[in-house]
Amino acid sequence: MTTDPPDTPASDARRADDGPTFRDGEPGHGVFGRERRALTFGVLLAVASFAAEGMGVVPALPTVVRELGGMSLFGLAFSTFMLAWLLGTVAAGQLADARGPGQAMAAGLSGFGAGLLLAAAARGMPLFLAGRALQGAGGGAMLAAAYVAVARGYPDALRARMMALTSSAWIVPAVCGPALSGYVVQRASWRLVFVGVVPLLVVTALVVLPPMRALALHKPLGDGVRLRKAARLAAGAGLLLGSAALRRDTWPWLGGALATGALGFALLAPALRALLPAGALTARPGLPAGIAVRGVLAFAYFGTEAFVPLGASELRGASPTRAGLVLSAASLGWIAASWVQDRQESRTGASGRAARVQRGFGVLTLGIALVAVGLLSSLPAALAGVGCLIAGAGIGTTYGATTLYCIAEAPPGREGEVSGQLQLAEALCTAAATGLGGAVYAAVEHQGHGPRGALAAVLALTLAVSALGIAVAARLRARRGSTPTTNKGAA
């Protein structure tokens, strides 16, 4: 999951015609001052609610798919969420630009809550996947509205503080959420993992919606061009990943899978060219390479993380609680490495970013390798936990440095566009990693190689992509100090 701001340039918030903002000279002007206290707590609750669901679902999913009989669709439970999240983010950003963040937040909270309840009530995978889609769209809208509220409701001097607070809102869910979710699954029911977030959404709505009324706007809605492009991209990616999950044991099924995949590719390819910077698909040195690095990073890390609880339970007999603790270790590694990366950034600045990204990929690759050893071999299973800790440190080192690199490469006034491209690359590659990983797992297991062979194939894929990231990151060096561009056409 991402915490990057939506595709709305922060500079837009300073325009006089963008509607009301709270001024720095008002009484109690800090983020927790009287004028902004409710908005601050509401934004933090919205982010924490999204984080709680995101960190709690992963350890619960192996139990969910077993009970609902959908092991072959395991990966789609993640990719459906991410593709819908992408659509929700773009739609909410457009709505917030025209009407303010309040309507977008209300729609997001409603969709997110409905998705949670639908997933909790599901008796089969189709209904569960529909719930995951609603969760993704609603969650994307919530985060987009939250970041627009930060841009429009706080002066420059307070925005950095609010961004730091929104990042910290992930800490408790990231560290405690997986283990707590596993405990609930083990002691009660996986359905409570979804239902348990709903009361938090109600509290969030009561706190955040009233102060967001002060940020309301009355502009015409945009032309929706970007939303239509994002919809084509999500539909194409969904069809492509769905085709990979279809049965292939008879010619009619194989033909259907090929036709579905071809249609998906026809929708996906032009949308990618329109939404990503020129050269992103070939990692052209400079900004395109930075966008490519974010996609490779998301594929390698989240593609591994999604299958750790499944491997821990299927191969090492770990309970959901213990599997959750392994993911908590990854979160701790990410948090610690992010802090170290921030300290290094303050010392070396832009000159050290490319090297830190390469080192981070090296650490991530080592972590994934240890996860594979811990889950697939007869060595102590604790190695998987150590591997997750190291993998978390790898992405923690790389994630922030990549963001700073890409924003620095953005032309003045187009930072919001680049931020949106980073989100797009992350969401799409996370969906690809989990959807493709699920298809690979099901196909290898169907061939008689069992869960061990299936998981080995998935981890071999993410390990190879992580190693590829070291080479892709090397292309960040070539554009240092040159003039950035954001030409359209990703090829």
Image: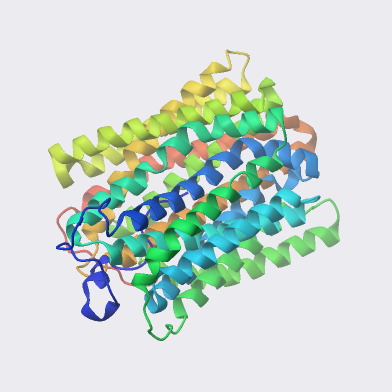
Residue drawn at the location 39% of the way across and 38% of the way down: 395
Look at the picture and state if 186 lies above or below 42: above
Q: Is residue 83 visible?
A: no
Q: Position of residue 37 (x, y in %)?
A: 32, 54
Numbered marks: total: 0
Q: Between residues 118 and 489, which one lies in front from this camera angle?
A: 118
Look at the picture and state if 322 lies above or below 340: above
Colouring method of the image? rainbow
Residue drawn at the location 39% of the way across and 29% of the way down: 333
Q: Between residues 130 and 405, which one lies in front from this camera angle?
A: 130
Look at the picture and state if 283 lies above or below 416: above
Q: Would residue 16 appear left or right of 365 to someone viewing this image?
A: left
The answer to which image quadrant residue 393 occupies is top left
Q: Would residue 276 appear left or right of 58 to someone viewing this image?
A: left
Q: Is residue 61 visible?
A: yes
Q: Would residue 105 appear left or right of 251 to someone viewing this image?
A: left
Q: Position of residue 479 (x, y in %)?
A: 21, 55
Q: Position of residue 31 (x, y in %)?
A: 26, 52
Residue drawn at the location 75% of the way across and 37% of the way down: 445
The answer to which image quadrant residue 39 occupies is bottom left
Residue drawn at the location 68% of the way across and 27% of the way down: 313
Q: Position of residue 417 (x, y in %)?
A: 33, 67
Task: Give the quadrant of the C terminus.
Answer: bottom left
Q: Would residue 151 appear left or right of 310 to someone viewing this image?
A: left
Q: Between residues 331 and 210, which one lies in front from this camera angle?
A: 210
